[in-house]
Image: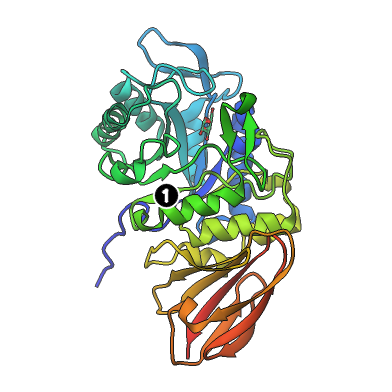
Amino acid sequence: MLDSPKPLAYTPPMGWNSWNMLGSKVDEASIRDTADAIVSMGFKDLGYEYVVIDDCWSEKGKRDSDGNLIPNPEKFPNGLKALADYVHGKGLKIGIYSDAADRTCGGYPGSYGFEEQDAALWASFGFDFLKYDYCNAPDDQATAIDRYTRMGDALRKTGREFLYSLCEWGGRSPQLWGRQVGGQMWRVSGDIFDSWINIAMDGGRWYGIGVDISLDVADDLHEFGGPGGWNDLDMLVVGLKGKGHISGGGMSFLEYQTHMSLWVIACSPLMIGCDITKMDGETAGLLLNPEVIAVNQDPLGKPGRRVRTQGRVETWRKPLADGSVAVALINRGSSVQEVSLKASDAGLLDSTKHVRNLWTGKDIADFTWEMKQKVEAHETILLKVMAQ
Ligand code: GLA
């Protein structure tokens, strides 16, 4: 019997997005090099699939005489159709960006009032994914739903399959209506920075989100993610190390490991934001661990949640399709702490449980009621707990 095809984004989408590293410097060469690296360095084999061009790809301040958006010829000398063909030739998919107003966040033309025309253009180029931002649009929820619906309808009308990624930063509760407007993922917070803590910008008018606060956002919204529709904690900052386009100054290895662990256990999309063509071993280890990625991509599609707190260490639990459980011990504090993992934390009572550390790839213990574990400051120990 043939398996019926899985719905789009049945598991959290995976790929790479240009913004965190390149900002407005996105261009054809970087997209091609990234697509090459996704294949040659083993990312594709692990499920990283979408290569997404974020803001600043078009000509600023204008459309052509037919009203079409114009890909910037200096950045994309061979045009977007040729680039889409190249990315497809690697067995990958390609994404584009726009905004539900007249201008994007970077001040480039937005798609409000041009939804069908722009969707048709992207479809003609061969795009597979749209990230749709919300800068310069009215604040209220009803307008956001209307504008996201207009683009969702326009994408559907093209007849081409688009993964629709909503980016209104969570302020209008997109977890409640994201699916209804045709979305498969919706941002649940402001822009992440390359930082453990939030960073105030513009004299405190807005905040870049740090990894620490993302834990609370993910826990609050865990019940809304599932096959076909996911809470998006924003693109990954793993590997930027303070060198990206976004602010924040960088994090320690253990902080990046906690960041990756949270995105994995919360079923956030995994959209890499660093330069994977020049990656060090630590970064590769965090982005390319098959057992860790399997937790994020688990077919049960159940986002994890916090189940217990001991001092500054949180225990998170995510049930998996094979009956086992992923458990994260996350130390938000600034000193090492020894904590217990109880049978009830895993939701697996009575039986003997076999415990494997997914970051180190080592089987570490068998226990029935309780085991102890030391967690360093800002570290996450990610475990798979299996009943015997
Ligand atoms: C907003 C989004 C970011 C990025 C930029 C581009 O801030 O939230 O992810 O797309 O716009 O200008």
Comparing 359 with 196, the one in front is 196
Left-right relation of 201 to 87:
right
Residue annotated with mark 1: 231
Left-right relation of 334 to 366:
right
Comparing 123 with 339, the one in front is 339
Residue found at the very far top of the displayed protein: 65
Quadrant where the N terminus sits is bottom left
Residue found at the very far front of the displayed protein: 311
Badge 1 local density, few (<14 within 10 Å), some, or many (20+)?
Answer: many
Q: Given the image, on which type of amino acid does mark 1 rest?
A: Asn
x, y percentage for residue 11? 40, 58
Give the mark count: 1
Is residue 26 visible to us here? no
x, y percentage for residue 115? 31, 24
Residue 85 drawn above or below residue 297: above
Left-right relation of 2 to 335:
left
x, y percentage for residue 156? 26, 36
- Residue at point 53%, 24% (across, down): 57
Residue 223 drawn above or below residue 81: below
Residue 62 drawn above or below residue 129: above
Left-right relation of 90 to 311:
left
Is residue 334 visible to us here? yes
Give the secondary structure at mark 1: strand
Picture quadrant of residue 179: top left
- Ligand 1 near label 1 (Cβ, under 8 Å)? no
x, y percentage for residue 196? 66, 48
- Residue at point 46%, 80% (across, down): 344
- Residue at point 26%, 68% (across, down): 2
Q: How is the image coloured?
A: rainbow
